[in-house]
Amino acid sequence: MSETDYQKEQRRQWSRNDIPSGHLPVHKWYLRIDDPSKIKAKQPPPENVSIVRANSPTIEFYRFLYNNAGEEFLWGDRRRLSDEELLPLISPETCHLMVLYENGTPAGFCELDVSPPDHSEIKYFGMLPGFLGRGLGGYFLNASIQYAANLKQVPLILDTCSLDHESALENYRKRGFKIYQERDFFDPDPRLDGTIRTDAGKHVPLAK
């Protein structure tokens, strides 16, 4: 089996010699889709699955989604924010927080930002533990792209990185996203300062 771009980057990142102590080497891909309306026809929803916009979500509900979807992939940025810092990011009408439910249980979320005048951005897209690998993510991503297309604000952009799920990059490409920029950077390991539990993110070695 040939090595994927994700696997190549993970290997390359750990060969870097410019990483400060306590930080993780990261490669980020920036992607865009210029006309989301041209994606494949929307799949019919799986049985007992629904998508609901959470209007003015509470801090507690947002943290439940963000923390659970992102823990294994070391999403630490918004965990570090205080409630006062986080609330202005998720409460505006331009923040569309779409929640995927299966049998009434939250299964994933997509945070779409339509505040920029010249594009829309998927800030976060993630599935909760127990719902990965079942095909729900593909359906949800297609539905999220179509939702963005219906808002008539294009292009649609997002980014992913070498800490994310190994299938994320390929899944975005399959839905029509194209890479328009890449870059290396480093990020404080959130497991070292107590932001995230130390045994999370088993696919990423602890920073030295």
Image (spheres, rainbow, N blue to C red):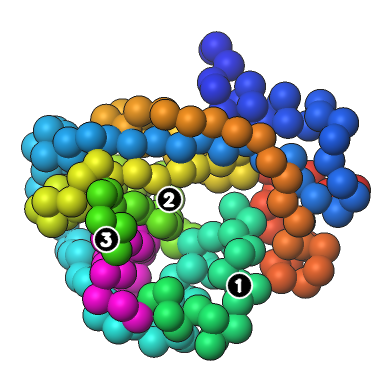
Residue 188 on image: x %, y %: 76, 56
Q: According to the image, label 1 marks what residue? A: 79
Q: Earlier in the sequence, mark 2 or mark 3?
A: 3
Residue that appears at 60% across and 33% down? 183
| Residue 139 visible in the snapshot | no
Q: Is residue 154 above or below residue 102?
A: above
Residue 103 on image: x %, y %: 24, 70
Q: Secondary structure at mark 3?
A: loop
Q: Earlier in the sequence, mark 1 or mark 3?
A: 1
Which disc number belongs to residue 155?
none
Q: CA distance from mark 2 to mark 3?
A: 27 Å
Q: According to the image, label 3 marks what residue? A: 114
The magenta-colored residue range is 91-114
Q: Earlier in the sequence, mark 2 or mark 1?
A: 1
Closer to the eye: label 2 or 1: 1
Residue 205 within the segment the image draws in magenta: no
Residue 110's quadrant in the figure? bottom left
Camera-nearest residue between 27 and 163: 27
Q: Secondary structure at mark 1?
A: loop
How many numbered discs sit on the rendered protein?
A: 3
Asked whether, in this view, residue 166 is left or right of residue 119, the answer is right
Which disc number belongs to residue 132?
2
Are there few (<14), some (14-19), or many (20+) residues within 10 Å of tag 2?
A: some
Q: Secondary structure at mark 2?
A: loop
Q: Amino acid at mark 1?
A: Arg
Are there few (<14), some (14-19), or many (20+) residues within 10 Å of tag 1?
A: some
Camera-nearest residue between 125 and 114: 114
Residue 133 on image: x %, y %: 41, 45
Residue that appears at 18% across and 51% down? 153
Q: CA distance from mark 1 to mark 3?
A: 22 Å
| Residue 205 visible in the snapshot | yes
